[in-house]
Structures are given as structure tokens and as C-alpha cells.
Image (spheres, rainbow, N blue to C red):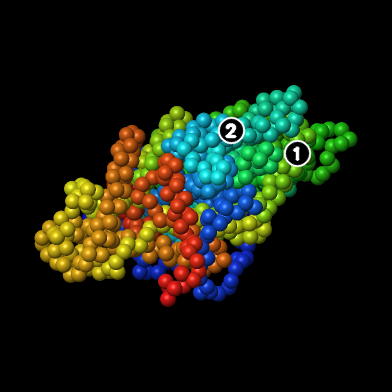
Amino acid sequence: MTPRAATHQSSRATARVGPLVATHEPKQLLDVDALLDDRSRGIIVCCGSGGVGKTTTSAALALRAAERGRRVVVLTIDPARRLAQSMGIEALDNTPRPVPGVKGKGGGSLDAMMLDMKRTFDEVVQSQASPEKAEQILKNPFYIAVSSSFAGTQEYMAMEKLGQLDKDAQHTGRWDLIVVDTPPSRSALDFLDAPERLSSFLDGKFMKLLLAPARGPARLMTAGFGMVTNAITKIIGAQVLQDMKAFVAAFDTLFGGFRQRALRTFELLQDRRTAFVVVAAPEPDALREAAYFVERLRAEQMPLAGLVVNRVSSKPSGDLTAHAAMTGVEQLRTSGEDHGLAAGLLRLHADRLTVVEREKRLTRRFGTSHPDVPTAVLPALSTDVHDLDGLRRIGDLLGAQVDHRPARRRADQAG
Amino acid sequence: MSRVPEVTPGRALPAATLVRMPAPRAESAPDFPGVQLHIVTGKGGTGKSTVSAALALALASRGNTVLLCEVEGRQGIAQLFDVPPLPYEERRVARGTTGAGDVYALAIDAESALLEYLDMYYRLGRAGKALDRFGVVEFATTIAPGVRDVLLTGKVYEAANRNRRNKGAREYDAIVLDAPPTGRISQFLNVNTELAGLAKVGPIKSQADVVMKLLRSSRTAIHLVTVLEEMPVQETGDGIAELRGAELPVGGVIVNMVRPQDLDAAERAALLDGTVDREALVASLEKAGISADDELVDGLLEEGHDHAERRQLEDTQRALVEQLGAPTYELPLLPGGVDLAGLYELAEALCEEGLG
């Protein structure tokens, strides 16, 4: 089995970690403001499956942190056009720029940048190799293909950029918090696996095989060797093999550097300075991904701050049940008169309650199997978010999860 | 038509969840005659897997033998049809009755596709195992850009053009591919260009060429799933432009999770400006046997206001979708979520709208 398949399947097949029976302890709430104000946290990574609002959540967290006094840089991957415009990062130039209109208090500031994966890769090569060698690599057709379309390059480069920003922040003191959005991968786990995958590939037998001279005393003396090279040539053609060999030969000296970097990134993610925020929507697929992710982070000993469930339908006020509403609709229908508005509103009410009930069931299921994951639940907004005010609204909702009034007053009120 | 057959999924389905399917009709897909390969893409979270499955059921209900493929290793089909995880093997997941066809499902993974390909075309045997040991399979399927996609689309091609090498394999009238998301679809399907800088000659290149020929032909249609929100609609537009730029045949746009259309324009306008005749509403509610106190009426009006606001946004986005120059189909939001019964409802809707 290939390492990739292995990590993928094993991460899904790992034994579940957590309580074996449902407990009825009160659910933990994610204290977003405490997380943002904690100066010992220098990195927040937002991850989750595609389409759950990761980009918006990371931008909202970054803005809120900046307006609470942190000096923040947010690395986004693929923001909506209007959101990118409003943050002043339309140009994909890999350079963090100040976001206009941020009301930073107490020295707070916000810079934003959009990831350019090819450029990031090029920069790594340039920083690692001599100018002539770098040029040779950058021109190789195989490199061009790998750097622009290798499944996982984006994930790997996001992590690489995080490492660079962190180094920069440590060095210049320009930022004290880095917020990272992760690529919209097939699976949320991809970005954790990408560095490992790349370095295991670079360490792999295949690379050695490509590097081995075809003839002569240094030739690899393994049984399958001739058969393998023949097969490869037959399948991909001699020219591709040639390009690959040239690439590998030119890249050879850089491999050590890449492995080191992959390792460092992994360590950075395990560091106590880092906090992961898993983002999900109240849908079975997204919550399943979130569960895998939470378990994986635990297994890798990476610090998990909590779960944000976006776009949760809020329960309508009043105690009219879905059933009662639909009975009402039926009665109006048989009355023979026109009660369009009332019937429509009642149907909406019944649908809404059904949705709320289903979402509650799904999130509760997650909560039961992962009771110790602090969770923030965000209501669905009736409008799209594409400016700083929208992000602020999300930030306020994130901050409003935990009641910060003194415990006694809360208890009085409850009693 | 009076005869209403039932479609029974492969296994473990309680009788209560059986859903009536439309009667079989003798055409493949009314709006896309002659199309054998339906490729379904969409932004994450828009429900492309659900739509793919519903489309497969709809096509089968017309008497077609259908293969539903997934390529992202998510086991989405197994979850939707409530069957155990699918292996690299065509398994029947839904069986039609009286005139309806069957739906088979296949989870394609690049490693298995490569080994099968090697076996089918090169009779590699031991060398195939050696390739695996040397990390070549891993290299080809995870690192070598484009190769992975050629392998995945190549398997779909093989299913669409069964030949002597795959003895006794089933022939399909229609194939539905649950493809990667919109942001990656052109790259995924444009296997030729992706390989161009890499392999200019050789077997991989020829394989990419024949796959490309099928994908660009009138036997293929690429459908895009969206919801009526800004970002997915924008991505759908970008996706269509990219597909057309790559000369890939765009099929329909399927607008998923459309909110219920319970309120008419005048009612929505009144809710938005707060000019609803409250007394009339209270009277109607009383008539419905519901005691309408202020809290309830305020609550309903607020829900109505939210709904009207959302519908307004949806209408703006719908207008944009209509300008994309592709036939559109709408599927309702299912408040209870997509279970098997919901899936069959969506399939019926696709049939009625003429896509499946």
C-alpha cells in the first residue's frame, strides 16, 4: 500500500478516541476572545472541508484579533472576489499588505495576503540553490508541472508560507499573530499530509532509482530494477523519464533542505504557540470531516482550540410546533378562502423547525462523540459577507459565544 | 402513465423507505440525447455528490443501465445509498423494476486504476508488483502531475468504451461521474494540456489523447451544480468559461437547495417593507386553529422577512445564472436533509425537468 493511501485510510480507520458512553456534562463553549487575546498563541490555523466558510471565518478571526490589539497577518487561499477586494488583496502577489479600514486599538493592525503557490515554490527553490542551478530547475518541464499542478502543492505551499511568515514575524516583530486559511482540499486532512507526503517521496526508493546511473559499478543491484525501468520507459516514454532524471539530478542537493523544512513545519504545527480551529457546517459530510480532523489532530498532538459550526439555522421564537403549523396549513387549504400569506408563513415556520431539528441532531451527535471540543455555533446570516462590516458581525458572533459576566450573576439569573 | 415501478436499492433498505419512481421512458436523457457520459462538478458544499446520485437514478428510471463513479476517495456514494464502502469494483447499488435499469457504482482510485491498466495493456504481472515496491505506483498516482488524472479519467473512458481486453465487462448506457470541484474541474478534465509540457510522445500521451477525444465529444456533457449564493454562482461562471476555453462540452447548470417558493412577490414585498396587514394575518391564523398571540405573529413576520431577504438575493443570483448560457434545472432544499427518500425525490425532479 502506498504511504498516501496508508495515511489516508489509517487516519479514518483509527480507533475512535474519546468517551465510550455519552456523558451529560455541559457542552464546552469556544471562548474566541480568550483565544485571540492569548499572547502566547502566535498562529491560528483554520481548517475544514470545502464550502464551510473557512476563508470568511479566518478573515473574521484575524480582523477581530487586530481590533483587539494584536498585530495580525492573515494568509488566505482563495477568497471570494468581493471579500478580497474589500481587504485590498486583489493582486495575487504573495506580499502581505495592510487592510484599509481596520480600527486597530492599542497598536493592533491587520495585513492580508493571498497565496501564490507557484511563486512560493519558486522562491523556495531560489533560496535553496545557487542562481544557475535555480534557473535550471525553474526551467525544467517536470518542475513546472509539479509546481503548478501537483495534487498537494497548494497545501504544501500554504504550510511553507506559514513557516516563512512565522520566521519573518520572529525576526522583525512585525506581527504577533498569524492566521492561516487552508486550501479547499478534497479532504481537510490533505494539508497535514502534504509535507509528509512530499518528504517521504523525496526519500523514496523511486528517487534513488532515478538518481542511480543506468550502467556502471554504482548501478543498483536489485532483482526488479531492469524490469522496472523498462516498464517505466514503456509506459511514460523515454523523454518524460529523461526530464524527470534531469529534474531529480538538479534537485538532489535541495532534497535535504525540503525534508528539513517539511519537518520544521510539522513541528511548528505541534508547537504550543499554534492553535487549530476546525470549521464545519451543520451537514453530515462537513461534520464527518471535522470529526476525522479533530481525531487526527489529537493523534498528532497538535493543539486544537475548538470547533466553529457555521451557518446554523436559528430556532424561531414561540412554541408553535412544526406539526401544529402544518395542521394549520391543511385547515386553511380546505377552508376554500385565500390565506396565502398565513399559509406560506406557517409552511416556512414548519420547514425552519425541521431544519433546526436536523442540524441540532447532527451537531449533538458530534458533541456526544467529542464532548471535550469547545464549540462555537454561528447563525446563518441572511446576507453574504463581503466587507469588513460583515466580517465584524461574524467576529461579534464568534466573540459572543461565552458569557463573560461574573459567574455569580449568571447563577442568580439561572436560579 | 399509470404503471409506477419501484426501484429497490441493493441492500439493507427497509421497505418503508421505498419511493415511487417515474415510469420508465425509452430515451436516455431528453435534454441531452446522445450523451453517454454525464460529468457533475460543483463548488464544495453545493451537493454535487447528491446531484450525481440523483441523476444516475433518474437515468436508470428510463431503462438505462447506469454506472455512477466517484474519484475523490470520499466514499460519498456508499454513504448516500447506505451501503458498505465501495471497493474498486462495479457494484449494483440500486435495482430497477419493470422496465427501469440498474445503477452500479464504482469508487475509482488511481493506484488500482494504474495496476489494472498495466495488467490490461502490458500484462505486467511481476513487474507490476515490482513497480509498486519501487514506489513507482505512488509516484505516478500522487506526485506526477496529470498522471493521476489521466488514470482516473482513463478508467471512466474504459467503462464507456468496453473492449475485448476487459472480458465480460458490463456495457453501460450512461455513466455519471461525480467529479472534483469546480475550481479544479478544467485541470482535471484537460488531461492533455496538463501532460503537454511533460509527455509529448509515448503511451501515456496516447492514452490522454483518446480520453480527451471522448471528453470533448458530443457523447459527454459537463454539468455544474451551484446554489443561489454569490461565491458558488461566481465560481460556476468562471468554471463554464474555463471549460469552454478548453473546448469541453458544458451541459446544464443545476441549481440545488432552492428555498421553498411559498410566498408570492407581493407578499414578500410587504414583509420587506413591514406593510403586512397584521389583522388579516391574525384572522387567518385563528382560522387555521392557531391562537395568534403577539409573540407568534412577530416571530412569523420575522421569519418571513428573513426569507424574503434571502429570496431577493437568490433572485439576483438566479438572474446571473440565467446569463451563463446553459440550460438550468432547479432542485428544492430538503428540510429533512438528503436521505434515500430525499435522493429519490431529487431524481424525480430531474426527470420532470428533463435532465435525467
Label 2 neighbourhood size at 10 Å, few (<14), some (14-19), many (20+)? some
* Vertical relation: A329 (above or below) A20: above
Residue beneath the point at 72% across and 46% down: A264
List the single residue furthest toward the right: A217
List the single residue furthest toward the front: A106
**Residue A257 shows which numbered tag?**
1
Question: Taking B270 as reference, is A137 left or right?
Answer: right
Percent coordinates x, y for residue B331 in the rendering: 33, 50
Q: How many marks?
A: 2
Q: CA distance from mark 2 to mark 1?
A: 23 Å
The disc numbered 1 marks a residue on which chain? A
In primary-sequence order, the first of circles 2 and 1 is 2
Residue beneath the point at 47% across and 66% down: A364
**Residue A95 shows which numbered tag?**
2
Q: Identity of the amino acid at label 1?
A: Gly
The disc numbered 2 marks a residue on which chain? A
Percent coordinates x, y for residue B213 in the rendering: 48, 32
List the single residue furthest toward the left: A337
Can I make out residue B208 in this image? no
Residue beneath the point at 49% across and 71% down: A408
